[in-house]
Amino acid sequence: MRDDTIIKATNHINKVLFESKYRGQPKIAIILGSGLGPLTSQVKIDVEIPYKDIPYFPVSTAPGHIGRLIFGKLDKKDVILLDGRFHFYEGYNGQDIAIVLRSLKVLGVTYLIQTNAAGGINKDFRPGDFMLITDHINNSGTNPLIGKNNSDFGPRFPDMSECYDPVLQQNARKAAQELDIDLKEGVYIWFMGPSYETPAEIRMARILGADAVGMSTVPETIIAVHAGLKVLAISVISNLAAGVSETKLDENEVLVTANAKRHLFADFIIRIISKIIL
């Protein structure tokens, strides 16, 4: 039997949807990263549910993360938008984030599209670039699946050799070409935060093969893959990482850069969604 926390969370969501006479059947969920919330303006919103109203759901506290589930349509497809995500640096752990991702699975989601604002490690990257995440490095020293395995969702030892779905990646490449976007590709490394990385840590990350760095995405990917979801992840390079430029890191720079690219980024995500065959 599924975890009682997930049952109560999904029961509440379904109750709100029923009372709202919502008839959609979303197979696609999109997690909006820092500064990328304006994508919601492109959605025909049917129902909004604040995270704080959902039993056992964590609540977003990071700047730029509103904290709500949005049910609506993008490109005539039913979608769920997570307007705000959850980070380990906020005090959450893998079990907290798993409630969210596993609830999506129970609600019928098959595809998870993740977005984030990331620091550029690759010296060929510039602020404002989009990077397709082709693989990741978990540098946190922990794993969101630590603890008793919930076999209702996946195996004790899930395979991560293709954690970012090849078909969805190809859809993203085609969408970028159609929109004349110079889509970068690379490896994302997860640092837990909340402090930004030191120049020495960024040099280490570059040696390990990382192209971009951030404080999210990897735990969600691990949990989603464990549950059998197909994952796509795209970073907006919002700043250059420590030591790559002489500029000190500032969260406002992250939000400003992401916000400046919001319209093109929204078009990009919508074009990707148009290529998903449900």
Image: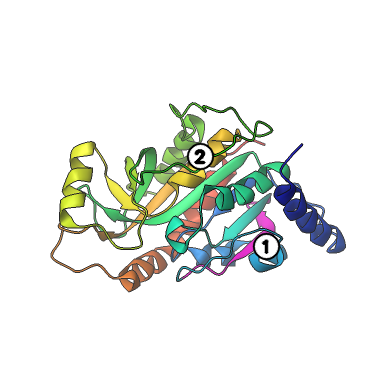
Give the residue type at disc 1: Lys
Provide the secondary structure element on which disc 1 rests. Answer: strand
Res 225 → quadrant: top right
* Label 2 crowd (10 A; few <14 / some 14-19 / many >=20): few
Marks 2 and 1 sit apart, C-alpha to C-alpha, by: 38 Å
**Residue drawn at (74%, 47%) of the image:** 4
Task: Name the spot of residue 257 as percent of width and height, x first.
Answer: 34, 66
Magenta span has 229?
no
Give the residue pinned by disc 2: 146
Q: Amino acid at mark 2?
A: Ile
Whole-percent x, y for residue 25 in the image: 75, 47
Q: Quarter of the image holding residue 227? A: top right
Answer whether residue 123 is visible to the viewer in this image: no
Q: Does residue 91 appear anywhere in the picture? A: yes
Q: Nearer the viewer, residue 135 or 260?
A: 135
Please state the horizontal and vertical placement of residue 230, each as a whole percent of the image: 56, 36
Residue at figure coordinates x 46%, y 59% from the top left:
33
Residues in magenta?
A: 64-77
Residue at 69% over, 33% down: 152
Assign the C terminus to one quadrant of the image: top right
Of residues 215 and 265, the one nearer the viewer is: 215
Residue designated by label 1 = 44
Dot 1 surroundings within 10 Å: few (below 14), some, or many (20 or more)? some
Q: Is residue 68 magenta?
A: yes
Q: From the image, which quarter does the N terminus lie in? A: top right
Numbered disc 2: secondary structure: loop
Q: Earlier in the sequence, mark 2 or mark 1?
A: 1
Seen from the viewer's position, the closer of residues 267 and 55 is 55
- Of discs 2 and 1, which sits in the foreground? 2
Q: Is residue 17 left or right of residue 258?
A: right
Q: Nearer the viewer, residue 193 or 263?
A: 193
